[in-house]
Image (spheres, grey):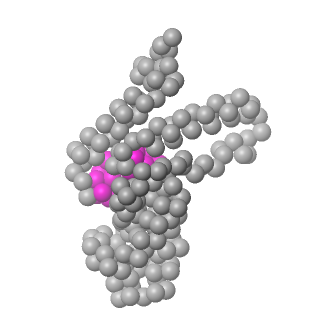
Amino acid sequence: MKPKTIVQKLKNGDNEVLKLVYELFYKSTFQAALFITSDPNLAEDAVHDTFLKLRDKIDQLEDPSKLGAWLCRIAANIAKDLMSDRVKCTSLVEPLDKYQDKKLISPETVLLDKEAKQLIRQVIERLRPGYRQIIYLKYYEDMSVNEISKTLGLPAGTVKSRLFHARREIRKLIEPKTGFNRHNKFRG
């Protein structure tokens, strides 16, 4: 079914299409919300609210082909709202182990890679939600600055600025923990 048809059926209140949209976009909206909240329960609440609001907000969608990105934006915004109501933050869900099919990887390599990922997740969790959202879209959803701009409804310059500040904050948080400065020189 074409995106334009899906959106039109949603506007007409078709429950079967709503189920289809849920099945198609649940995972991506959950990931977007989880990246902001770092809490699977809060992320689930955000996704639930996203799909509840879908019918009321569907008229705001300008480009039916961007339905998935639009839903992710709604989920991320709801997640940010939920975060402002709660202080508690837990760690992100562990990603799938990329070494599961590789037999010649040493245990040391796996451990070091896991520790590096854990450090990065911990640092990203310490960012304010707006920065986390930009980092998620750029590096986990592989979106361009223009795509992020359209998805979030922000000027491209604002997206670039937030990316710059988020990266700078990540660098400030990582350098003391690793002993490496921004030019990859060990500070002993």
Q: Residue at x 48, y 49 (%)?
A: 89
Q: Main secondary structure of the magenta part?
A: helix
Spot occupied by residue 68 in the image (x, y as percentages of width and height): 41, 66
Q: How many marks?
A: 0
Q: Residue at x 34, y 72 (%)?
A: 64
The answer to whether one can see residue 26 in this image is: yes
Give the residue at the far top of this rendering: 188
Nearer to the camera, 41 or 137: 41
Nearer to the camera, 114 or 65: 114
Spot occupied by residue 62 in the image (x, y as percentages of width and height): 27, 70
The answer to whether one can see residue 138 in this image is: no
Please provide the residue range marked out in magenta: 132-152
Q: Residue at x 44, y 65 (%)?
A: 46
Spot occupied by residue 155 in the image (x, y as percentages of width and height): 22, 51
Nearer to the camera, 114 or 16: 114
Q: Residue at x 27, y 73 (%)?
A: 60
- Is 26 colored magenta in this rendering? no
Spot occupied by residue 138 in the image (x, y as percentages of width and height): 40, 47
Give the residue at the far right of this rendering: 103
Q: Is residue 26 above or below residue 111?
A: below
**In this rendering, would 27 be left or right of 145?**
right
**In this rendering, would 175 be left or right of 80?**
right
- Is 139 colored magenta in this rendering? yes
Q: Is residue 181 above or below residue 36?
A: above
